[in-house]
Amino acid sequence: MAAMAIILNLETATTNCSVSISNDDKVVVLQENNAANYSHSEQLHVFIKEALKEASLSFSDLDAVAISKGPGSYTGLRIGVSAAKGLCFSLDLPLISIPTLQSMAHQVQLEPGEMVIPVLDARRMEVYSCVYDNNYQEIRETRAEVINEASFADYVSGKKVYVLGSGAEKCRGALQHPNFVFNDSVVPSSKQMASIAFEKFKSNQFEDVAYFEPYYLKDFVLQQKKKKN
């Protein structure tokens, strides 16, 4: 029988400061607070200690730490990744990284043929987005993109396409196809990280703790240079 895995999951990519502890792929404790202002620096370590206490566990019981790697808030990601790396170094634990948009996709139940597009608000009409099929497999890579009426047109001809997250309201104004279903109330949560983290744990998909960095999608910002006259 395979050994069980106790995993600490940290999600700080957006305003939701979220901590969960999972036993294999099941969440046993969830601590989170979605505040309008970023409070991760004050709350994250408190939530970690409270979650361990509620689960009647100590740091020594953990088998791995999973972190939401982005895209998202630069400051939020830095705080979460720094905390995760610190725990992994001090406790000699493996680090698991999970794309923020991937765990968001798991917040909707999909029928065969349906798709989900998690979208996080970026700047102006820009969003961070990724496209997943009904098995939550990535069918188009994560991008930072400007939303217009042609966005995601390749994916909407069949069944419903769920557009989830803080960027959904921008999309609602531009995307007119009746198959789009919008929900701007979805925020990334450590709750949906558990099953993904356990699959990575079983297959030893770990990060190099020393060199791991959040996924900022910085390149998109660097491309916005003023044209020379």
Image (cartoon, rainbow, N blue to C red):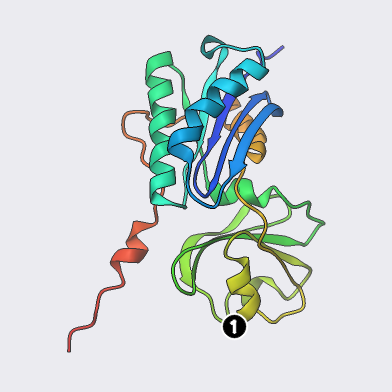
Is 51 above or below relative to 156?
A: above
Is 39 above or below relative to 182?
A: above
Q: Horizontal and vertical percent for residue 50?
A: 59, 22
Q: How many marks?
A: 1
Name the residue furthest right: 111
Label 1 packing within 10 angstroms: few (<14), some (14-19), many (20+): few
Q: Quadrant of the N terminus?
A: top right
Residue depicted at x 37% and y 20% = 89
Nearer-the-camera pick, 100 or 203: 100
The residue wearing badge 1 is 149
User: Does residue 140 appear left or right of residue 133 in this picture?
Assistant: left
Q: Horizontal and vertical percent for residue 97?
A: 49, 37
Q: Horizontal and vertical percent for residue 130?
A: 56, 59
Residue depicted at x 66% and y 52% = 105
Residue depicted at x 17% and y 89% = 229
| Amino acid marked by disc 1 | Glu
- Residue 103 seen in render: yes
- As helix, strand or loop, the secondary structure at mark 1 comes to loop
- Residue 152 seen in render: no
Is 208 above or below relative to 166?
A: above
Nearer-the-camera pick, 188 or 153: 188
- Asked where in the image residue 28 lies, by quadrant, the reply is top right
Q: Horizontal and vertical percent for residue 150?
A: 58, 81
Name the residue furthest left: 229
Residue depicted at x 76% and y 73% = 179
